Image: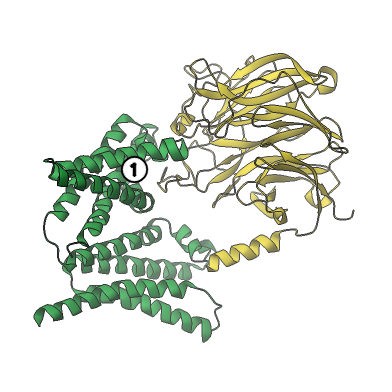
Chain colours: A green, B yellow
Amino acid sequence: MRIAKYPFAVFSAALFTIMLMTPVTSISNLIWLASVDMPVDFISSLKVILFDFQRLGIGLYGVVVIGFSVAFIVAGLISRFSSLGGKYLYAIAGAAAIGMTLFLMVELLFQTQLLAGNRTILGKVFHIGAGFFGGYFFYSLISSDKSYTFIIRFLGIFYAYWLLGLSLEWIFTPVQASADFGFILNELSNEAQNALLRDFTSLFVATFLFSLLGAITLNPAWFFSAGIIYFGAGIFNLIAIYVHGTGFNQIFLFEFILGAWPSALALTIILKEKKLRN
Amino acid sequence: MKKNLLLFLLLFSNSSFSSYQLETVLSDLDDAWSFVFLSEDKILYTEMPGKLKIASLSNTFIKEIENVPVVQYGGQGGLSEVILDPNFESNNTIYLSYSATNENNESTLFVLSAVLKGNALENNKVIFQAKAPRKAPVHFGAKIAFLNDGTILIASGDGFDYREMAQALDNHFGKIIRINKDGSVPEDNPFINVTNALPDIYSYGHRNMQGLVVTKTGIVYEHEHGPRGGDEINIVKPSLNYGWPAITYGLDYAGAMISPFSENEGMEQPLLQWTPSIAPSDMIYYENDIYPELKNSFLVTALVSRDVKKVTFKGGTHNQESLFSELGERLRNIQASPGGTLYLLTDGPSGKLIKVLPKEL
């Protein structure tokens, strides 16, 4: 765990930073929409903030991980070979990483400001501030000993974060979500639309919650619950293909991965606990 | 995966594979952007680095035109549209759109009129300079078309980083402009008497328009690139607001939600929107008889879907069909010759001009 905690601290700090960064773009867009008399309300604001956390965040995540990795290695070396160190060194490194990453994204890659929230000085300050808190969070994670549960929690939360996208899509944009699954929602009967919406939304929201609860409580039953549902989806998908002749698809592979991920977390918890008891 | 398979099947089942003979008549064109027919055999075409050339299609003889304005080539900018004056036969006047830097060294869109005399331009006159200065040379729009009353429409894009400006009337970001041939503002422009509005604005709330067609009956159609999804075809009418970026069917490139709204009172809905994006790059309304199956339909070239969409509108619905996908090329421009033969221009530094021969030949 001594070594493993560092990369997982970077992954965790990056996710925390994303959670602080994406609302900058969401809120700047919402403020502008309200300024031109668009009917911005609580639900539409929530929709934008949650969607951005997932869809914008998942794209930014890799970039932040790379930026943080470089910055925290440099901070670690400075800390080791000088009298400087501590939480503020990592916080400044995090801020510098985000500032530099956003600057380079414009200057080297796109020429334009892809992150709408970064177009204003205030937006830049908020983003750099998010990096500062991300660095601070990273330091708090590495400054204490971590057990295996740290990794379990991260992987459980990351799994939930991924499922959040599907859940949001089924809640807020069911037509698009249906299309992604090969249905033209409006062409289905009312009963079929109802069944599709309630069952799919329930499936993704439930598994999202199961994995989140698993990460919080470390009770393997929650992770197994999510795993069983997706293993079931994979198995019944194969039955549908080969017994009921619904046509081949490769979604079952994806379903087995979604089943295996939380199941592996649950099994790890059980085995580790058993080992500790012995 | 199932969706991808369906998409693949749809693409190829709708494609008129091998229905047409496609013949490359010009090649190695350097980032060619638009072309126009001077005769059945001769075209005038632009290359983004700033070259305007005349080419003979029968013997592939190419001659560069002199005295072309200096352009800012880079990003999406450069020498863009070329069109002929409706009275070209008598006045030899052409119009060019291009990006160049203004007095503050910022990029913006310019439109120039000039007389084509021999192999040179004369009487060059900038008739429009967009009040849309930008740091990055992107999203210029740059399409030009003549209305049936002889005034000029110019598509001025939103500049990407300045998208919110498309909703304000004090600038040229995300606007369609209407001016006279000499650059003056027509007195019947919709915002001419509106305080703080630029008088040459015709419609607003657009993104990056790269298709602009005026039919014989005077209806104006435009298409514009959406962000990630939400490419649109609209009927353009004076004074109307087309909604960008307050309403959109697309997402930001980074994945963010630009707006949770796709419709709002006082904002126009598209006739057709493409999600996912096809990246529409040009459009004509085909009215000739050479290809009867294409008559009275819009032909839209696309960069991402690498085909031509044949689009027809009837009774509030639309039909579309994919053509020429067998080329597998990003298509930049489409024109019909005076006799009605279709030509396609491919995108990029080694562009080609491809002649489309009807099936029966």
10 Å neighbourhood of mark 1: few (<14), some, or many (≥20)?
many
Identify the residue under disc 1: A26
Quadrant hosting residue A96: top left
Question: Outermost residue toward the right?
Answer: B361
Q: Is residue B144 visible?
A: no
Q: Is residue B357 above or below residue A155?
A: above
Q: Is residue B253 left or right of residue A149?
A: right
Question: Outermost residue toward the front?
Answer: A81
Point out residue A153 in the picture as x, y percentages from the top left corner: 21, 64
Amino acid carrying label 1: it is Ser
Residue at the image position 20 percent from the left and 39 percent from the top: A92
The chain to which mark 1 is attached is A
Residue at the image position 23 percent from the left and 42 percent from the top: A93
Q: Is residue A5 above or below residue B243?
A: below
Taking depth in this image into account, of B64 and A219 the one nearest to the observer is: B64
How many marks overall?
1
Taking depth in this image into account, of B109 and A97 the one nearest to the observer is: A97
Taking depth in this image into account, of A30 and A102 the one nearest to the observer is: A102
Point out residue B268 in the picture as x, y percentages from the top left corner: 54, 39
Q: Is residue B257 left or right of residue B54?
A: left
Point out residue B237 in the picture as x, y percentages from the top left corner: 61, 32
Residue at the image position 34 percent from the left and 76 percent from the top: A229
Taking depth in this image into account, of B149 and A160 the one nearest to the observer is: A160
